[in-house]
Image (spheres, rainbow, N blue to C red):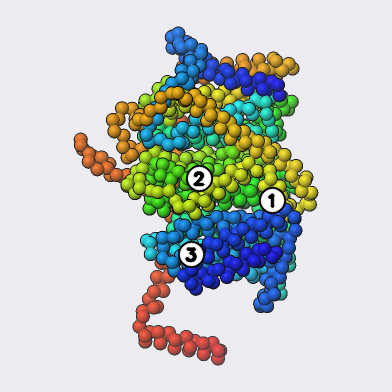
Amino acid sequence: MVLPLIGLIVLLASAVVCGLSKRGDVLGPCAATIAGALAVFAGGQSLLTGASPTITLPIPLPFGAPRLEIDPLTAWFVIVIGMIGAMAAVYGHSYLSNQPRRTISLSWCWYNLLLAAMLLVVLARDGFFFLVFWEVMSLSSFFLVVHDHEKCGVVRAGWTYLIATHLGTAFLLVMFMLLGSPDSMDFVHFNPAVVPGGASLIFALALVGFGTKAGLVPLHVWLPEAHPVAPSHVSALMSGVMVKIGIYGLLRVLTFLGPPPSGWGWVMIFIGVVTGLTGVIFALVQHDLKRLLAYSTVENIGIIVLALGLGVLGIAAGNIVVATMGICAALLHTLNHALFKSLLFLGAGAVLHAAGTGRMDRLGGMLRYMPYTGAAFLVGAAAISALPPLNGFVSEFLVYAAAFHVMSVGASAWSGLIAVAAMALIGGLAVACFTKAFGIIFLGSPRSKTASQAREAPAGMRTAMILLALLCLGAGLGGPWLVGLVMPAISQLLPVSMSLNELQGIFHMLPWISYAGLGLLIGTALLLGLRAVLLRGREIRSGETWDCGYAAPSPRMQYSAASFVQPIGSMFAGLMRTRRRLQAPQGLFPTAARLETETPDFFVQSCFAPIVRGLARLAAAFRDLQQGRTHLCILYIVATLLLMLIWHLG
Amino acid sequence: MRWGLLHVLFALVSAPLLAGVINRTKAFFGGRHGPSFFQLYYDIFKLLRKDAVYSRTTSWIFRTAPPIELAAVLLALLFTPLGSTAAWLCFQGDLLLVVYALGLMRFMIISAALDTGSAFEGMGASREAQLSALAEVALLVALLAVAAFTKSFSLSAFAAQAWAAGLVWPANAILPLVSAALLVVLLAENARLPFDDPNTHLELTMIHEAMILDHCGVDLAFIEYGSALKMWILSAILVSMALPLRASSSLLNFATGLGAMVIVALLVGYIESVMARLRLIRTPQLLVTAGVLSFLAVMVAMR
């Protein structure tokens, strides 16, 4: 317990120093990296030894002293937070370097505060402090989102985020008030049996409250707004880690609620499928890289919740294989998504840094100018498409395996079919989405002048991306080891106690995936060698791309991001309602033609916008009350005082 | 095990022969003599000895993609059974490895196509991405149907346990449904009619051939050979699900498996002879139909 405490102290102290001085540009990232390393170490120690050290901080406060604990479930998330927090900090040091020192320093203040708050949220064992830390997390990330507040649209996105996160927190507040008692808000005293409405009400509140943070459809609307405008290392941390704190909250609440009914599993599967499909479909049609990545986070959260739903169904049905596989898939995908999504966001940031735009149709051929960034981005794109030998495949494999095993659980069998069909469609569309992202940005030739003047990212940014890419590969090949590591956390969520070895036996097929991944790497190396041998002594020329007779192909003839997804987009046209502005070529000698497409979020357009408009109209009705005239204000005061007097007398 | 290894070796040697059978069948229906059965071998050997021309637009992705594609499809082959002959390697969940290894192959083909910066290849890549997303659903759900019936999650175990579990067609509706779905997937994934026309690559309607327009020499040989192996793998999966015969002798099983492969090739040739290519706007509908058939198969399996 000492290590994470030191880490927290380092973070909080550095946050104070960064907030007050201008010297945060080195101190901030250093502190975050050290604290991240300590957190990873502490989490790993707890998972490997199986110990759950706990500590009560000796601070007298009205709701009792805050109690912190690292049990295996917490430890798993502590590792995720620490690892990505450190990597993003290394990256952020270079990323921010061209800004004024005071701005940088302030940004690191919020960054380290966010990191500390996330660690405290997963460590807290008390409803009151959980909410306090949760709020600190939301606020510090809000300030990070509005870092570039002078740019157009940034503040608006920040407000969207702030409102969404507080709506979510409101549900959590109610949940903790129902669970706790005035005497104690400690998690060990929570008893859902005495709650009016029972455990299902708590579950529903948790699903909405934590689902807002995690980005479950239709509560995901803040993600595609906030993630693109934040600085890229912050997007990486928010998208890779902070949304996962929502998943952690859901898991933690499940540990209070006793044996779950199968209905919860069905709800989670349904929400997971809807979230996953919506996320990937909207990700496909985005033309801004960071927006695309934000929607893809929604998709992956859907996969995690789907896996969790399968696990809950397994627990409800008493099928330990399904339960273990589902929960394991969810936890493993949490880590894997943190790795490849933060890698992709960092890559997006490098592109943004170098070319000044994230609009895909202005980019192209970046691989030539940014070879390391491009290679790392390719690894991330392949990993998120769940391709072997990378880490995404391992966790999605487990989702499929859980879905297959649930087929033998009588009444829940249908969920297996739904899960497999949804996963297959999500997988296929994800391949389309990320071949587009990688292909349009990094391959071909540059579509604008700024793109062709791009330079490779500086060393700090490169280091973080390459390390994350290697971790993606490592987690892909080391699947069985990771499953062994996460096993104590899984057994914490299972209703029956089984030995870890027995649970490990369920995953007997996982070494095969590692062998297959290794085989794939070796096979590729051998075939590359064979290709080199065959090409030896041959004449190798270069020429223009063969475009069926064009004498001078130009970059503008390339397929664009919009044209690449048009066939798939047309299949989901009813959901997406893409806006097209077409200026068609006219006459025998057409001069200018233009096509713009934009796909606004369906749920914003048809779900939230009408509600907000209604609220605004309602509020406008009261506008007459506030005229800004002093005597009217005095009249209100007098009237109020009179009313109170009458009420008091009567 | 031994027979599985033999299957791998056999596939490595004779995969290009399937294309020969298909082309000769088409020639027969067209009243022509047609190319030699071994034409694809000649093509591949010729390509292996060629010089190379690379577009200045391309990067290392374009050069490393063909070996990665071939490695992926070779990996899938190791886990593919042939009829009731189990694959050389198998484990619970190997069908996912096969499907996702083919996914890796597709990812690299699409990337290499986009690397050329050509409008044709972008178009092919875009269509491939669309059709394969739908084909993957049909394929995985079809395999799930058999998995649900046999309570096993391995391609190799399907054949053995389906027989033991009484999954005999046409008495049981699962196999016809699954076979139909798999046949559609086979046609779509291997760029055959009615999805794609393998004969030409210079028209706006093409998919696979348009994507590999800029590859040459050794790279094209790798791709052609990889495509032949992919055809073999998907045909072998179809045969494993649909073959109505199970003999007691391994040799006989292997031989019937090979015979069924030839029948699949003949069938593909026949379909290509009697059908026109569907309009692009219709092809997703055919794949969705295949997906629906797979869904029905799962429902029957869960009954």
- For disc 2, the neighbor class at 10 Å (few under 14, some 14 to 19, many from 20) is many
Question: Which percent across, then down, holds residue A310?
Answer: 66, 47
Q: Are marks 3 and 2 on the same chain?
A: yes
Amino acid on which the number 1 mark rests in the picture: Val
Question: Which percent across, then down, holds residue A361?
Answer: 37, 45
Q: What residue does disc 3 label?
A: A25
Q: Quadrant of residue B217?
A: top left
Vertical side of A151 occupied by B232: above or below? above
Quote the CA–CA distance across marks 3 and 2. Answer: 26 Å
In the rendered view, does A544 fall on the left or right side of A385? left
Q: Which mark is residue A376?
A: 2
Q: Which mark is residue A486?
A: 1
Quote the CA–CA distance across marks 2 and 1. Answer: 26 Å
- Residue at 58% x, 66% y is A11
Amino acid on which the number 3 mark rests in the picture: Asp
Question: Which percent across, then down, holds residue B158?
Answer: 68, 28
